[in-house]
Image (cartoon, coloured by chain):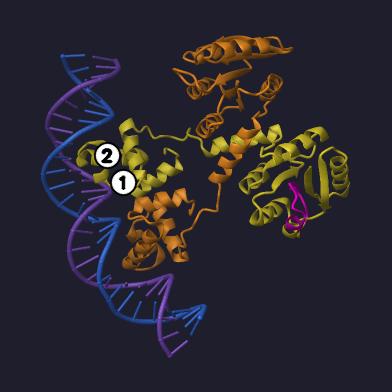
Chain colours: A orange, B yellow, C purple, D blue
Amino acid sequence: MTRLLIYEDNPQLREGLTMLINGSEGFEVLAAFKNCNSVEEEVKAFKPDVVLMDIDMPGTNGIEGLKKIRKSSEDVKVLMLTVFDDNKNVFEAISNGANGYVLKKTAPAKLLEYIQEAQTGGAPMTSSIATQVLKMFSSIHSDKGDNYDLSEREKQVLQLLVNGYSYKMIASEMFIAIDTVRSHIKKIYEKLHVNSKSEAVAKAFKSRII
Amino acid sequence: MTRLLIYEDNPQLREGLTMLINGSEGFEVLAAFKNCNSVEEEVKAFKPDVVLMDIDMPGTNGIEGLKKIRKSSEDVKVLMLTVFDDNKNVFEAISNGANGYVLKKTAPAKLLEYIQEAQTGGAPMTSSIATQVLKMFSSIHSDKGDNYDLSEREKQVLQLLVNGYSYKMIASEMFIAIDTVRSHIKKIYEKLHVNSKSEAVAKAFKSRII
DNA sequence: CTGCCTATCACACATTTATGTGATTGGGTG
DNA sequence: CACCCAATCACATAAATGTGTGATAGGCAG
């Protein structure tokens, strides 16, 4: 028996979901709430297997609700529910330990399947969501980022800058004069289109030159 | 009609897959190869909709094959096929633009469904794979990392530092005196255990405070 | 061979940063 | 109420950084 809590502000949908799930073999809705202001206590009291959490709710939204749940319980599975496959929300939800992310327009049968999957440790996702996740993932780990045509020597200098070295330290580290370090850095700044050390460092991280 | 290429070193499995797919309505295997040494030319010649690519192959492995394909064609869908839900491979595959990642033990019916999904722009993943992806994702973007107890105001200042602002610019942006900016930054440095702007920026990126 | 680029070094000067030492105000807590 | 702390501002000074304008030497391509 899979025991659920539902958080959904829309009364029709909340009722609909509750009826659908209660009417299905092996599922039971313990309670359904219209906001997640007290989600911590409720989860603690009901000890559900799975939480269905709407993302777009007034007051405490679903992401906040998810965070609250994760503060006290790593164990309960949380399935995010939304109308949009909105990039930022997907990202936030996943980063905060959601177990899955499904669109509301998902067919009832599919939804039950997803719930089951979540409970058994899977990560159910609408196909469009999965696509987004993969895209985000590969954009994060894209090593295609420009390297701005830095020369080898310039890359070394930049690396040391990123590690927090001063000009003086770089000079001694690289066995060159401090003025040479300046020269290199000036060149680096031109190539990166920045004009301060911290900007260069930030750009190095963003472009994954480092 | 979904047109496929198959790369799989195991003869039994290669034949099995070919027969399964060819025997199914709406699918056609254009060719099946036992290695992907000439994958670029083959993809160019056959122009398949979907490529089934085994990961664990002798010679050029599946990841290399994927890279080769992606060099010349962004369009063809590539579905990675493997016996393991091995962490590193999943990561590599996704980073290199695989459209999906399924285990070989996937039931035939499910596999056809996955192929269809991939072709229509979805990102089919075995549930266990999806779980892994989510875990990797959240570990990359874990904001559980220390925030070093920065106050709200300090976080704002640090954010602006990261964006390349000078003290002067921060002061005007935040409507405070430049000396106040100095105070905040001094505090920030203490909390982050650094003593220069660029180090603070680097640490901000590393700890994902930003 | 000539021109171009990288790497090296030098000097000068203005600006920015880093650090120390204070002071004031208002909010929160024991 | 007394105390602490975050946030604000001030003044001073040393160090580091950013920028301009050179010069020299070696490697490589046309």
Q: Is residue A11 left or right of residue B130?
A: left
Where does label 1 land, which residue?
B165
Find residue A1 and report its image quarter: top right
Q: Chain of mark 2?
A: B
Q: Residue visible at 71% across and 34% down?
A: B126
In terms of secondary structure, where does tag 2 sit?
helix
Residue closer to the observer: B11 or B29: B29
| Amino acid at pointer 1 | Tyr
Q: Chain of mark 1?
A: B
Q: Residue visible at 56% across and 31% down?
A: A85
Quarter in which the C terminus of chain B is drawn? top left
Q: Is residue A43 left or right of residue D15?
A: right
Where does label 2 land, which residue?
B173
- Give neighbour class at mark 1: few <14, some 14-19, many 20+ (Cα, 10 Å): some
Q: Is residue A103 left or right of residue C10?
A: right
Within the magenta stretch, is there residue A41?
no
Q: Give coordinates of residue B178: x percent, y percent.
A: 21, 42
| Amino acid at pointer 2 | Glu
Asked if the residue at tag 2 contacts the one at tag 1, i.e. Cβ–Cβ closer than 8 Å, the answer is yes
Within the magenta stretch, is there residue B48?
yes
Residue closer to the observer: B30 or A148: B30
User: In the picture shown, does residue C3 fall above or below A114?
Assistant: below
Quarter in which the N terminus of chain B is drawn? top right
Q: Give coordinates of residue A165: x percent, y percent.
A: 37, 55
- Magenta part of the protein: which range? B42-58
